[in-house]
Image (tube, grey):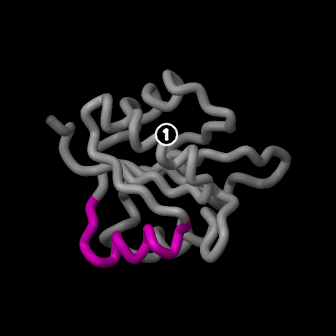
């Protein structure tokens, strides 16, 4: 059983990405995992329609700010909700315009609560 459309997990930390994927699967969600913003954006542009994007900010190839900038330019993609996951503190988050920001390390209960609040 899955709860509708998939949830994208976009994070360059392989262990964290896979752990989140397993957690979401255990909770009945389908998770689609990407190690950088560029591959996630390609998935979206190829017709992927997730119910939520869990987005790391600091990644190689295309970081979270760049991903979000491209997502917002695309009329079909701009309304997909985004929850940012970041270990960074002390930088300006306002350009990201996410529904919510979770600071790493993220508790699993905290993450699931954010998914429930924000998934469409």
Residue 39 locus on image (x, y percent): 46, 73
Front-most of residues 14 and 64? 14
Q: Residue furthest right?
A: 90
Q: Is residue 9 above or below residue 34?
A: above
- x and y percent of residue 9 in the render? 45, 52
Which image quarter holds the N terminus? top left
- Which residue is found at the position 28% from the left and 77% from the top? 46
- Per the image, the residue denoted by label 1 is 19
Considering the whole magenta stretch, tell me its main secondary structure: helix
Instruction: State which quadrant residue 117 falls in.
Output: top left
**Hey, which residue is sitting farthest top in the picture?**
109
Magenta span covers which residues? 36-49
Q: Which residue is depicted at the point 58% across and 26% down?
A: 107
Residue 109, percent from left and from top: 49, 22
Where is residue 80? Give x, y as percent.
Answer: 37, 56
Residue 10 lies left or right of residue 21; in this view the side is right
**Residue appearing at x 60%, y 73% in the figure:** 62
In the foreground, 57 or 33: 33
**Quadrant location of residue 66?**
bottom right
Farthest left residue? Answer: 1
Quadrant where the C terminus is found in the figure: top left
Any magenta on residue 73? Answer: no
Q: Is residue 40 magenta?
A: yes
- SS class, disc 1: helix
Q: Residue at x 31, y 37 (%)?
A: 25
């Amino acid at each position: 059983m899955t709860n509708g459309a998939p949830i994208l997990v976009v994070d360059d930390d392989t262990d964290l990405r896979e752990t989140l994927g397993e957690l979401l699967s255990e909770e009945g969600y389908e998770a689609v995992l990407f190690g950088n913003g560029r591959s996630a954006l390609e998935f979206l542009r190829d017709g992927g329609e997730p119910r939520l994007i869990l987005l790391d900010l600091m990644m190689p190839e295309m970081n979270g700010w760049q991903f979000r900038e491209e997502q917002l330019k695309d009329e079909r993609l701009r309304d997909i909700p985004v929850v940012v996951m970041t270990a960074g503190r002390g930088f300006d988050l306002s350009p990201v315009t996410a529904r919510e920001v979770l600071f790493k390390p993220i508790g699993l209960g905290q993450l699931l609560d954010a998914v429930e609040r924000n998934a469409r």
